């Protein structure tokens, strides 16, 4: 699959950085939601839907 190479670069702003604490802490970055980011998210799921395991509905662009 060549999905990343077929996509134009978009600017992404981060709203915040956070940390899920625990024995194996996880750092996360929360992006500012934009129309371009949502379109890229939707295009990714459309491009990969037939090629592998399904993601949880929570992570779909329409969720």
Image: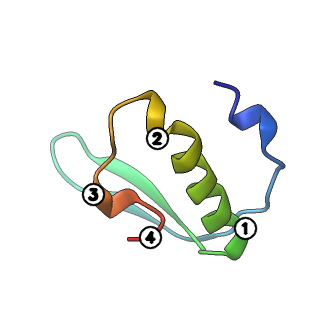
- Image quarter where the C terminus lies is bottom left
As helix, strand or loop, the secondary structure at mark 3 comes to: strand
For marks 4 and 1, the one nearer the N-term is 1
For marks 3 and 4, the one nearer the N-term is 3
Q: Residues within 10 Å of mark 2 (few under 14, many from 20)?
A: few
As helix, strand or loop, the secondary structure at mark 2 comes to: helix
As helix, strand or loop, the secondary structure at mark 1 comes to: helix
Between the C-alphas of marks 1 and 2, the distance is: 20 Å
Q: Is residue 7 above or below residue 29?
A: above
Q: Which residue is mark 2?
A: 49
Between the C-alphas of marks 3 and 1, the distance is: 27 Å
Q: Position of residue 33 (x, y in %)?
A: 59, 74
Q: Is residue 19 left or right of residue 30?
A: left
Q: Position of residue 61 (x, y in %)?
A: 48, 65
Mark 3–mark 1 CB contact (< 8 Å) = no
For marks 1 and 2, the one nearer the N-term is 1
Q: Residues within 10 Å of mark 4 (few under 14, many from 20)?
A: few
For marks 2 and 4, the one nearer the N-term is 2
Q: Which residue is mark 4?
A: 62
- Image quarter where the N terminus lies is top right
- For residue 20, the mark is 3
Residue ID at (52%, 37%): 48
As helix, strand or loop, the secondary structure at mark 4 comes to: loop
Q: Which residue is mark 1?
A: 36
Mark 4–mark 1 CB contact (< 8 Å) = no
Q: Is residue 50 left or right of residue 2?
A: left
Between the C-alphas of marks 2 and 4, the distance is: 14 Å
For marks 3 and 2, the one nearer the N-term is 3
For marks 3 and 1, the one nearer the N-term is 3
């Amino acid at each position: 699959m060549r999905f990343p190479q077929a996509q134009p670069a978009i600017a992404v702003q981060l709203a915040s950085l956070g940390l899920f604490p625990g024995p194996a802490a996880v750092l996360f970055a929360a992006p500012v939601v934009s129309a371009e980011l949502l379109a890229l998210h939707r295009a990714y799921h459309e491009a990969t839907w037939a090629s592998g395991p399904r993601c949880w509905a929570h992570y779909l662009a329409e969720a």
